[in-house]
Amino acid sequence: MKMLKKIQSIFHDDWCKKCYTKMDVFDRHLYMLPMSVGHYVSHSDASYYKKNLYKVTRKADIPTGMYACGITRYKCSKCGYRVTKLSIFLPVRDQEKYEDFLYFEDGEFDEFLLLNR
C-alpha cells in the first residue's frame, strides 16, 4: 500500500513527498511579474521572484499582456513537511495559460510572504 501511495504522490503536487499523504493549503497569494507576452524566461532562483513580484489583490489588477504568479503554500498535517508552489501564468480572457510551475521546499518565501501581506 505504501508503494502505491508513493507512486501516486509523484503525480500530485499537493501530496507530501515524505509520508505520501494529501497536504493542506495554508496560504495563497497573487502577484504580477514584470514580463510581457512572449518574453517569459524561467528562473530557478527564488531571489529573482522575490525581487520582481508585485502584490495584486485580483487578476483584474494585472495589466493586459503581463504574467501573473500564484503562490500556494502547502503543509503536511501528518509530518510537518512544507512546500511553496509558484504557478506562473498569463491571464487570457478569464483563463490562465500556465507557463511554469516551481517548487521550493526550504522556506525561501517565508519571510517574503510575511512582509508582503
Image (cartoon, rainbow, N blue to C red):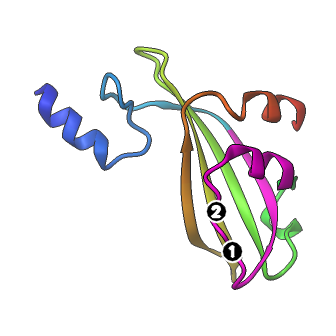
As drawn, 49 above or below 63: above
Q: Is residue 92 left or right of residue 81?
A: right
Left-right relation of 62 to 89: right
Q: Residue at x 87, y 75 (%)?
A: 63
Q: Position of residue 84 (x, y in %)?
A: 59, 38
SS at badge 1: loop
- Amino acid on which the number 2 mark rests in the picture: Ile
Dots 2, 1 in contact, CB < 8 A: yes
The residue lying at 73 percent from left, 28 percent from top is 110
* Mark 2 or 1, closer to the camera: 1
- In the rendered structure, the answer to whether residue 28 lies left or right of residue 57 reads left
Identified by mark 1, the residue type is Tyr
Q: Could you say where residue 61 lies in the image, as x and y percent from the top left?
A: 88, 66
Instruction: Tell me which numbered mark, 2 or 1, is placed earlier along the sequence.
Output: 1
Residue found at x 20% / y 41%: 7
Magenta highlight range: 28-52
Q: Of the numbered discs in the image, which one, if any, rests on residue 88?
A: 2
Q: Nearer the viewer, residue 67 or 92?
A: 67
Against 95, residue 54 (above or below) is: above
Q: Closer to the camera, 108 or 62?
A: 108
Quarter of the image where the N terminus is located: top left
Q: Which residue does the numbered mark 1 point to in the structure image?
A: 40
> Above or below — where is 21 with respect to 69?
above
Circle 2 sits in a helix, a strand or a loop, which is it?
strand
Question: Is 16 inside the magenta-drawn segment?
Answer: no
Q: Position of residue 42 (x, y in %)?
A: 62, 64
